[in-house]
Amino acid sequence: MRIIFAGTPEFAAENLKALLTSDHEVCAVYTQPDRPSGRGRKLTASPVKQIALAHQIPIEQPLNFKSADAVQILANYQADLMIVVAYGLLLPQSVLDTPSLGCINIHASLLPRWRGAAPIQRAILAGDTETGICIMQMEKGLDTGPVLAKITCPIDEGDTAQILHDRLAILGSEILLKTLSDIKKLQQNARAQDNALTCYADKLHKQEATIDWQQSCQQLARQVHAFNPWPVAQTLWQDHVFRIWQASPIEQEHAATPGEIIAINHDSIDVATGQGILRLTQVQLPGKRAMPVANFLNAHQVMVGEHLG
């Protein structure tokens, strides 16, 4: 098949790498325009664009598909199928109808649960015990199309968004190639989503990263895991922003005030929460790298009885 691939971040790049190992022809890659990145704010190509450049695949970076010219350029590639993975643009019906087999999307959740922008993080925050990958036939609605194929994946205790992201990227690549081998039959037998079971994975916001120590240790641990590597859970310590990269919940009763440091160990700091204890194991101060608590304690004096937040 002639395939157009549309995606932007590393998650999409992993799927493009897998596609390039197949017998299918990637006739074009669509990705977001280059964005400023890093301390120098230099324009940087997306991970997907970098792969396309390395394989000399034609690259398109439209701001949107509002113009007839943008749709015509896509049509000129005469693709059988368009694969969309975390592209970052909503596709109008004119684009969805252009490839002969339409457009399919690789989505990191078990649809209809967690439609939207941040399904991996929202699944962790909600305490879900499993997630997965769904490949759906795209419709105009947000992640509403019928599901062609799916694969499940457990969410293990301690999984961060980055760990789960990497695991799902591999699964997505595997199920994509299987789906392409039988695409027409799968489209005929596609399973419609049950809209009654829908929940939305809203985009992450920086303000969500601030820890409320009145919450339970379980919920705070989920917050730490879900927001690693961005926006990273944070509180205050001695008037400094104190970012928490790794932590685990301890179901243990205490009489301390939420946010109070109640124990300091060689490699961890125990903080009282509204229910139980949050054990911090990797932290970061402004201008410093994230580090194990053992290293942090070697460089800073922390006292039992101090409060965070």
Image: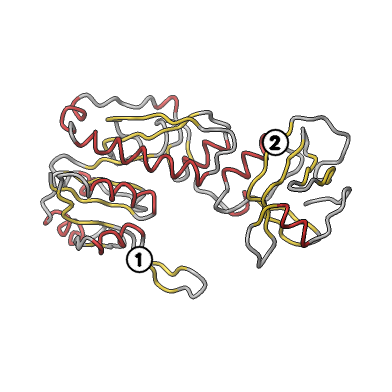
Instruction: Give the vertical position of 197 relative to 48 (above or below).
Output: above
Query: To which residue does mark 2 refer?
Result: 249
Q: Please state which of residues 199 and 252 is positioned toward the viewer in this rendering.
A: 252
Q: Name the secondary structure under disc 2.
A: strand
Query: To which residue does mark 1 refer?
Result: 45
The Cα atoms of the two marked residues, 1 and 2, are separated by 39 Å
Closest to the camera, between mark 1 and mark 2, is 2
Q: Please state which of residues 42 and 280 is positioned toward the viewer in this rendering.
A: 280
User: Is residue 151 shown left or right of residue 1?
Assistant: right
Instruction: Give the vertical position of 149 relative to 260 (above or below).
Output: above
Q: Name the secondary structure under disc 1.
A: loop
Q: Hey, which quadrant is residue 144 in on the image?
A: top left
Q: Please state which of residues 156 and 70 is positioned toward the viewer in this rendering.
A: 156
Between disc 1 and disc 2, whose residue precedes?
Answer: 1
The location of residue 191, given as percent across then percent down, is 29, 25
Residue at 17 percent of width and 27 percent of height: 185
| Three-letter code, disc 1 | Ala
The location of residue 90, given as percent across then percent down, is 33, 50
Q: Residues within 10 Å of mark 1 (few under 14, many from 20)?
A: some
| Three-letter code, disc 2 | Pro
